[in-house]
Image (spheres, rainbow, N blue to C red):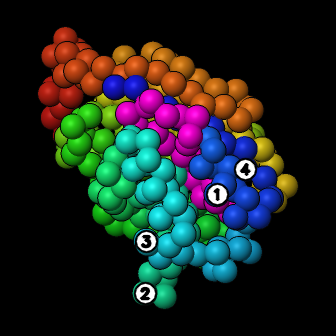
């Protein structure tokens, strides 16, 4: 399958302008089978003052416009994440949309960040581990800070995940952590991992970019720098089972 990761510039522009730019980037990703966007790209992860005002329902403007693009181009879309308002609570929520434009899965970020961030003060954490079964393979969903918690990825592995999608708003100066965790989560679970991180400066915080796609051996198939770009790679999902048979660390687990 052909995979595209959109490493989007996330600054301080208006939400409507940002959604329009995301649509244009999705147009450029035409031809991919699977596409992913960054975390809270529509208002900017660090725009905490806008979380309540710009929150949406699962069927809000952002979701509707992303669904329309998935349907227009016929690809599976991990639509990054947005601030969802649900029963009086706010969540960092990701949608997985099919090529028919219909919502296939909802993932609410489980691990909320508190270090230099107001996310854990404003939002509520999710509880459901989400692995989506598709004709492309079994796809696990995660968000940014989740990447630091191997237990979540092991739980997705236990649910059959062959490919992890990581939507993110990871900032400097913790670039080295980002680079390591992307590869480590792929290696220890013998799975593909595709990440989409933001770039640019949002509320005075610089995103570190370096989105990437990693194979089950931990080899980086493609990666970005610190500028807006679209990463592309061919992912042979069959390689997961082949590597797990060749190097059976997954089946050798005793805990």
Mark toward the start of the polypeptide (2 vs 3): 3
Magenta span of residues: 26-45
Query: Disc 2 versus disc 4: distance between alpha carbons?
Result: 28 Å
Which label belongs to residue 58?
3
Mark toward the start of the polypeptide (3 vs 1): 1
Which label belongs to residue 10?
4
Taking the spot 33% from the left edge, 60% from the top edge, the residue there is: 103
Which label belongs to residue 87?
2
**Proximity of marks 2 and 1: CB atoms separated by less than 8 Å:** no
Residue at the disc numbered 1:
19
> In the figure, is residue 104 to the left or right of 29?
left
Looking at the image, which is closer to me, 71 or 128?
71
> In the figure, is residue 78 to the left or right of 118?
left
Q: Residues within 10 Å of mark 3 (few under 14, many from 20)?
A: some
Taking the spot 66% from the left edge, 31% from the top edge, the residue there is: 229
Query: Disc 2 versus disc 3: distance between alpha carbons?
Result: 12 Å
- Residue 187 is a magenta residue: no
């Amino acid at each position: 399958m052909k995979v595209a990761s959109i490493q989007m510039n996330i600054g301080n522009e208006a939400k409507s302008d940002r959604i329009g730019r995301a649509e244009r980037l999705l147009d450029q990703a035409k031809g991919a089978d699977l596409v992913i966007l960054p975390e809270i790209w529509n208002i900017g992860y660090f725009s905490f003052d806008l979380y309540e005002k710009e929150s949406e329902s699962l069927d809000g403007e952002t979701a509707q416009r992303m669904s329309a693009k998935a349907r227009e181009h016929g690809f599976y879309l991990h639509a990054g994440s947005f601030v969802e308002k649900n029963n009086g609570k706010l969540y960092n929520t990701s949608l997985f949309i099919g090529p028919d434009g219909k919502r296939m899965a909802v993932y609410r970020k489980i691990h909320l960040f508190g270090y230099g961030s107001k996310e854990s003060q404003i939002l509520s954490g999710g509880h459901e581990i989400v692995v989506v079964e598709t004709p492309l393979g079994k796809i696990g969903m995660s968000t940014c800070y989740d990447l630091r918690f191997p237990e979540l990825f092991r739980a997705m592995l236990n649910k059959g995940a062959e490919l992890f999608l990581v939507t993110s708003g990871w900032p400097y100066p913790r670039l080295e952590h980002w680079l390591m965790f992307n590869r480590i989560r792929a290696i220890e679970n013998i799975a593909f991992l595709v990440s989409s991180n933001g770039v640019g400066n949002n509320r005075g915080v610089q995103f570190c970019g370096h989105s990437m796609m990693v194979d089950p051996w931990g080899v980086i198939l493609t990666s970005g720098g610190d500028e807006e770009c679209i990463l592309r790679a061919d992912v042979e999902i069959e390689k997961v089972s082949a590597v797990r048979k060749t190097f059976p660390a997954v089946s050798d687990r005793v805990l």
